[in-house]
Image (tube, grey):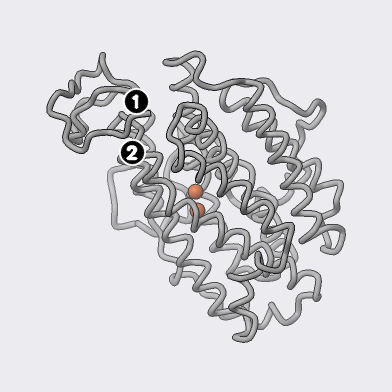
Amino acid sequence: MQRKILFNVNGNDEIINRRMIKGNVTNLFNLNNVKYQWANKLYRLMMENFWIPEKVSLFDDKRAYNELTPAEQNAYDGILSFLVFLDSIQTNNLPNISDYITAPEVNLILAIQTYQEAVHSQSYAYIIESIIPAEKRAFIYDRWREDKVLLERNKYIAEIYQDFIDERNDKNFARVLIANFLLEGVYFYNGFNFFYNLAARSLMIGTADEIKYINRDELTHCVIFANIIKEIRKEHSTFFSDDEIHEMFARAVEQEITWSNHIIGDNVMGITSETIEKYTKYIANKRLRDIGMPPLFEGYDVNPYQHLEKISDTNGEGNVKGNFFEANVSSYNQSTAVEGWDEI
Ligand SMILES: [Fe+2]
Ligand SMILES: [Fe+2]
């Protein structure tokens, strides 16, 4: 694949010529002329979702952390370790993707996504510093050095991203896009549900509030990649291999279940190895439908954690998970100074 020319004097920005990849744009941000209208809507929604981690008080969580069982503490720490990895690699890798996307309106929201991933990294630092005892903090970042299951899955994602950096061909880029979609749409969610599950028992409420903000951002990222994939499938019918997408989904689901059993298993009230499997296959099926593909796991169409949706507050009216394109400002936005976005 050809990396974009920074200022392409031979480019043509007319909408009719615009393509998600392999287009020929000047790379000026002419945002009055936009082909992919969903990107404009997402831009507004993402800006509206602005938040600051330190505005959430974690004071009570410090005490509540000591009341968790050893298994719950281990899961809490381990999930943070994985989240730290996911957001780190996203912040670092998104610009590599943007270099090959030839729709300025999409480059713009990828830049916002990159900044949001950086905020997420900052929120983990804030959580770790506020809650985790000093002697355990370094281990949250270094756990992958000792935990083979964590290392395995971190490496799986990193290698797909690295392959494209090393060899910039269509096949590797297609895999990067699917891996991103899996990361944003599947990998986070067993971890998120662990925190919502604690909050349902009135434990670690501040952490759950932080996670809600992160969850809300991740859902918009998931929509970005679903839309990028759908547009490329329309414009280049052979760019993706359906078999390969299904294969990557199957592998991701297997790793997600192995990891969640390893770090949570049957040791935390409200979560069992059965709910982990049901949830992971349910969310994978849902994401496949989101990109217009048939589901992979027959009979996994019900969310076993439906009762947690009230807590996660991401399924109600005015939210991306409910109906993204009709979404209004959600109840927990911090950017009240910004007005005039209500029509989104
Ligand atoms: Fe993130
Ligand atoms: Fe993300």
Q: CA distance from mark 1 to mark 2?
A: 18 Å
Q: Which amino acid type is marked by label 2?
A: Asp
Marker disc for residue 99: 2
Q: Dividing the picture into quarters, in which one does residue 296 lie?
A: top right
Q: Which mark is residue 36?
A: 1
Q: Nearer the viewer, residue 325 or 167?
A: 167
Q: Is mark 2 within 8 Å of ligand 2?
A: no
Q: Amino acid at mark 1?
A: Tyr
Left-right relation of 294 to 127: right
Residue in the foreground of this view, choosing between 290 and 335: 290
Image quadrant where one finds the C terminus: top left
Decide if residue 319 is in sight here: no
**How many residues crowd around disc 2 within 10 Å: few (fewer than 14), some, or many (20 or more)?**
some
In percent of width and height, residue 68 lies at 76, 75
Residue 73 to residue 34: above or below: below
Specify whether 63 is left or right of 158. right
- Of the numbered discs 1 and 2, the one sitting upstream in the chain is 1
Determine which of the numbered discs, if any, sits on residue 90 in the image.
none
Q: Nearer the viewer, mark 1 or mark 2?
A: 2
